[in-house]
Structure formats: C-alpha cells, structure tokens
Image (cartoon, coloured by chain):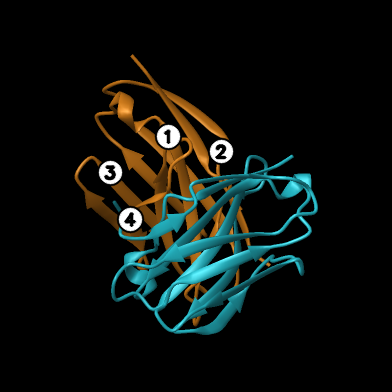
Amino acid sequence: GQNIDQPTEMTATEGAIVQINCTYQTSGFNGLFWYQQHAGEAPTFLSYNVLDGLEEKGRFSSFLSRSKGYSYLLLKELQMKDSASYLCAVSLMGYSTLTFGKGTMLLVSP
Amino acid sequence: DSGVTQTPKHLITATGQRVTLRCSPRSGDLSVYWYQQSLDQGLQFLIQYYNGEERAKGNILERFSAQQFPDLHSELNLSSLELGDSALYFCASSVDTTDGYTFGSGTRLTVV
C-alpha cells in the first residue's frame, strides 16, 4: 500500500514564508504532485516533481528527495488568498492515477 | 473554467435511491478519473477510464459503477445510497500525468 503524511493544519502571517512537508512510503514511486484546494472548490495543479531537487514557479517552489521519500511546498510572500488546503499526491510507475494525502489546511492571517 | 464539466453541481436525495453524476473531460483528454472527497477521508480514488475502457479501480464500492461513452463523457452511478455516501464527487481528466489532472468543479451529494 501507500502512505502519505502531511501536517493537518498550519498557520502563517501575510507576507511570510511557509513550508508544507509531505512524506511518503510507496513502492514503484514515479513522481509527486502538489495541488491547492480552496474550500468547496476543485483542486488546482501547482507543481510536479519527478527528479530530486527544487522546482520554482513564481511564489511557489516544490522540492523532492526520492531517497528520503520527502517533499515540501514552499510558499513565499504569503497572501490572504493563499489560505487553502494543500494536497500532496504521488504517482506510481506504469500508472496514471494519483494517490492523495489528506491535505494541509493553511490559514494566512493579517 | 477548467474545461472539465460536471453536472449536477448539487444533488440531495434520500437513502436507498440511485443517482447518476456526469462528467465531460477537457477536449483532447482521453482519461477520466473519479474521486470521492469526504471531510475525514480526503480525496479517494474510485475509478479511471481511458478511451472508453476501464483502466484502474480504487476504493469503489460494489454499489457504485461507472462508464465512459464513445464521445468520452463519463457517468458515475451510485445506487442504494447511504448517509455515508454524502460527499463531494470530483471528476478529473488528463492527457498524461506529467501535467497533472484537471479537475471539474465537483458534485456535492447529500443523502438524507
């Protein structure tokens, strides 16, 4: 089976930097995705990592260490609209389905 | 608008009933995925169709079934509904997973 762990909740202040961690245990790991989901809305794609290292996309960056089964999503210059749930998901080699973690609810305060 | 269309947006029905949820994928996407999201379980994969054929199955109950039609739209049928089936049901589509899925806006099912 697969096991994906993320913190349940995090809080941060507007303008700050926050790092959301995700650890996974799975065989046949292929890649890791991050999605953002506002309450009651559809998840939207943020990033995809298949190789070790950091991928930067504007205010958001995502890091992957395959050997450690670890990823993080880094959000800089936090804005109120970043308050949302952040979902970590893994894909396995040979399969196109994604398995999601339970998500981390981020609350950004003024 | 993500390009993935789900109908209806909201559905309220009684226990024991049967409902059908509909999904039209983004133009050009051959894969359709169905997920169930409840408060305590997160996003749970139900089933995937690729170009009309079942490709993968997840935690889908025997009371649930799905199909994908020649025009690539998909339907998820939920029968003998129970209170615990109340959840958000998302459909997603993709060309391949390197770009991730694109999700529809979901159907909120309430069983009373």
Name the residue carrying label 1: A84
Reply above or below: B60 against B30. above
Badge 4: residue crowd in 10 Å (few <14, some 14–19, many ≥20): many
Q: Which chain is orange?
A: A
Q: Please tell me which of labels 4 and 1 falls first in the chain.
A: 4
Do circles 1 and 3 both sit on a common chain? yes
Provide the chain ID for the residue under circle 2: A
The shade of chain B is cyan
Q: Please tell me which of labels 2 and 1 falls first in the chain.
A: 2
Name the residue carrying label 4: A47
From the image, state whether disc 2 or disc 1 is nearer to you. 1
Residue type (three-letter) at the residue carrying disc 4: Ser
**Which quadrant is the N terminus of chain A positioned in?**
bottom right
- Per the model, the C-alpha gap separating discs 2 and 3 is 18 Å
At 44% from the left and 72% from the top, the residue drawn is B73
Do circles 2 and 4 both sit on a common chain? yes
Provide the chain ID for the residue under circle 1: A
- For this view, does B64 lie left or right of residue B66? right
Residue type (three-letter) at the residue carrying disc 3: Phe
Residue type (three-letter) at the residue carrying disc 2: Pro
Q: Please tell me which of labels 2 and 3 falls first in the chain.
A: 2
* Residue A7 at x, y percent in the picture: 56, 38
Asked which secondary structure carries label 1, the reply is: strand
From the image, state whether disc 2 or disc 4 is nearer to you. 4
Q: Please tell me which of labels 2 and 4 falls first in the chain.
A: 2
Name the residue carrying label 3: A60
